[in-house]
Amino acid sequence: MVRKFVELMALSLLLLYTSCMEWDYGYVEEFDTSGERGLFICNEGNFQYGNATLSYYNPATKKVENEVFYRANAMKLGDVAQSMIIRNGIGWVVVNNSHVVFAIDINTFKEVGRITNLTSPRYIHFLSDEKAYITQIWDNRIFIVNPKRYEVTGYIEVPNMTMESGSTEQMVQYGKYVYVNCWSYQNRILKIDTDTDQIVDELVVGIQPTSLALDCNNKLWTVTDGGYEGSPYGYEAPSLYRIDAETFTIEKEFKFEFGDWPSEVQLNGAKDKIYWLNDDVWEMDVTADRAPAYPFLPYNGTLYYGLTICPHTGDVYIADAIDYVQQGKVYRYSSDGKLLDEFYVGIIPGAFCWK
Amino acid sequence: MTLRNIYILLALLLPFSLFAEEKAQKDWVRKGIYIPEVTVYGQRPMKEIGAQQTKFDSVVLKENIALSMADILTFNSSIFVKSYGRATLSTVSFRGTSPSHTQVSWNGMRINNPMLGMTDFSMIPSYFIDDASLLHGTSSVNETGGGLGGAVKMSTTPAQNKGFGLQYIQGIGSFKTFDEFLRLTYGNDHWQVSTRAVLSTSPNDYKYRNHDKKENIYDEDMNIIGQYYPIERNKSGSYRDFHLLQEVYYNTGKGDRLGLNAWYINSNRELPMLTTDYGDDMEFDNRQREQTFRGIISWDHIRSNWKVAAKAGYIYTWMAYDYKRDVGNGTMVHMTRSRSKVNTIYGQAEGEYYIGKKWLFTANLAAHQHFVESRDKNIILQEGNKGIVGYMKARIELSGSASVKWRPIDRLGLSAVIREEMYGTEWTPIIPAFFVDGVLSKVGNITAKASVSRNFRFPTLNDLYFLPGGNPNLRKESGWSYDAGLSFAVGRKGVYSLKGSATWFDSYIHDWILWLPTTKGFFSPKNIKDVHAYGVEMQVNLDVALTKEWQLSLDGTYSWTPSINHGEPISAADQSVGKQLPYVPKHSSTITGRISWRKWSFLYKWCYYSERYTMSSNDISLTGKLPEYFMSNISLEKEFSFRWADLSLKGTINNLFNEEYLSVLSRPMPGINFEFFVGITPKWGTKHKK
């Protein structure tokens, strides 16, 4: 009888053994985009879901390839693709919540290496082939790395900043100094001496400067978001600042309305025009003393998330994250505001990088 | 016998009938399946007229001590359980809705987290629940408001033992998992006292092949010369959960019952790393701790044709989330240190009044007063001193209902419910619900049911006040739901019973609240979607006594749940309109088969979820793929009965076919794993009530 019981169990298992999930390992796809000018789009993906992707757009053919990192490497890019820069044919993609910076061949999109042991990386800035800075959020240190060995070699500790309120963001270089905006619950721009890796000065601006750029006249541009209602750190009308890099002083402050949310300060190729998002897309000459009265592109009912200007043609690219859980869309406008192209990319397109 | 006498008899027999059910369920395990007489028309409770309910008996709930209510719902219901890993956050999607659209009550007190709106079912050990049922869609209005998907009702019941009793079970399983359960009981004609404790611990470091990343092999010049998909362990996934439940019941024997339930939870869980995380788990500590106390005192006063009851309760929850980083010298420094405290005071009064056999009037008023303190981040202010990002709020939530139920003839029942709710200072419009059921055929007990209701769900406290992002201008979600279904039941007592039902449902939800990122780097909720959730739910149950010694039972569920976004497009580029909501499977199914022979029993559990979309546009990408999966668990149990004790030995195999699967993107799930249980119930002169 016991045997019969066991036989019956075995039979029932056999009957219920239905096909299991077939796991797709993915296969490696070959790309070759050498000789092309192109645009990389970092699609953040949803925080904690590991679905960040990298898209590649060829402005000449108007062809977009999505998920190129996955397709070229048969693995995921990770969680929250924050930013990307290119140096000597290598693209450096900072994947914030995966604690990694991937180095990829910009023509084949294949990984050539990776920097790990990071806290929560945001941006990378190269000083030489063997030295770069990586800024972090939730850390009061800027990491010094050797990109050739993919190693962390040191830290720059930021004064008056704890790990919990730590936030260092975008970097630009003027001479031997690197300037960094401190964003989350911060209000300052840091000046780092790259010879000594020491912070030698800092400049207080408004609440939460979100981005940083250096124009053709060696003026730094940053825009604050003003914080938010109820924030113990404060809530104020945001401002756009022009800062003289040499003297490290504020030269001009352009005040926004209370409640505005400006972001994404970008420059054109000649670095003589500045662009930013504030519902509309705005454009201004870097020498202007007054903010423009009318936008470059008016608000069309959607919240733009990313912005870049083609350094070669002056075309303006704007990213629309739509509902943040579907493929975002990128709109390409000519420098005089005509729609030239539009294409879908990945989830939450936030950062661009020109090849 | 007069009608009044019938009711007195019913009231007096109630505790015994509960006991009979309990005993029947114990028989299930010890002696095989108890096949009751099929419920026939006219015997259906007045309270359940037209209601779509799924009840879980103690055979399901007490299957093994390692199970949480998330496991029970996964394998025994049509609800989709979204699990972030083993012993990790598990939320539910009831009829294609979001986790906060399912209202959850324990002994009548709502236990949804007032800050988040949802309930983590992985934190509810099924061994602590004696009675559980699902109220699908409209049926939840009978109990509470806000259940746009439905409600999960859980309660504890007296053990009905005489004298002292003890039960101890220990489980030892894969990944160094230890589960311990102890229950002490004492009972006499008036008192029932029970103490239950569960302790579950595990490093939970199961192995899995990581398909999302590759390890690099470098040469001396740091050129990649090889890559492979690593076999990794579930990093940072350990847990230690302790639960203690104290119950005291007093029955006067004259129609009054008093009860006290107190449940304490102490949980310490690491939050597992994503499959795409390249961090070193030794350098980070990502941990969530919780201490919760839930206490209820209750009084039921039962008379021949009326009943009044009152409850008072209190909930205290302390939650801590710590994300720490080794800064290089072994010192772990906080990156995030978040604390929240919730104090909830609860009171409820209800009454029932029968007029003859045909009318039942009920009224119910419940109040939950929440006091919430959320301290999410410590910062340095502009002036240099320290500050905290967080909020402190209080909110009163009232929910009252009145119903009239009418059974003009045995074959027909009608019910109307009116409910009204107030959160803070805002009232809902009247929430009406209508139910009807009727016996179409006495042959096969074919019964038709239908219902319609309006419903509302208020924003949670985090939706309104969380910093940053809380949006005090949110509107409450609202919806209409419709249900219609057929059921049948045939059988012969002690021989077989076959029951089944099929229900169609249709609901429209307006102003669905979603948290979306902002350009300032944080998320903020908005009323954004109109959703049409509809579909079909089917259930079937078969119990057969094959021979005197062989018993077979089969339970199956299937649901088809399209949940479609019908909102206005956010922009011209929006591709989500008309599409299935992300993470809601269109098809899901479960089968549970149990066969027993003498004191052996074998259980097979199977569930299936169709592919889930991860994008609102329903695009399937290489990085956003959640393929369908089947899951199979088995267990084999043998009971021994000695003069001095009952012993049980049980072995379980989870994920029998070692499937590699995901419930949520980047959250690895365990492969095949095992657990072995030994249970002992000493016979210290313990005598079951006869």
Image (tube, helix red, strand yellow):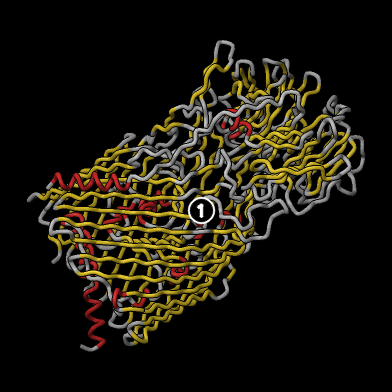
Q: Residues within 10 Å of mark 1 (few under 14, many from 20)?
A: many
Tell whether B256 sits left or right of A237: left
Front one among B181 and B194: B181
The residue depicted at 31 percent of the width and 58 percent of the height is B555
Type of the residue with mark 1: Val
The residue depicted at 45 percent of the width and 63 percent of the height is B536
Tell which subunit mark 1 falls on: B
Question: In this figure, which residue is indicated by the disc labeled 1?
Answer: B584
Q: Given the current orientation, which residue lies at the most extreme bottom position?
A: B2
Is A184 situated above or below A198?
A: below
Q: What x and y, as percent, mark residue A334?
A: 85, 40
Tell whether B455 sits left or right of B197: right
Q: Label 1's element?
A: loop
Counting every numbered tag in the picture gives: 1
Q: What x and y, as percent, mark residue A17?
A: 33, 44
Q: Quadrant of the C terminus of chain A?
A: top right
Tell whether B365 sits left or right of A351: left
Is residue B328 shown to the viewer in this render? yes
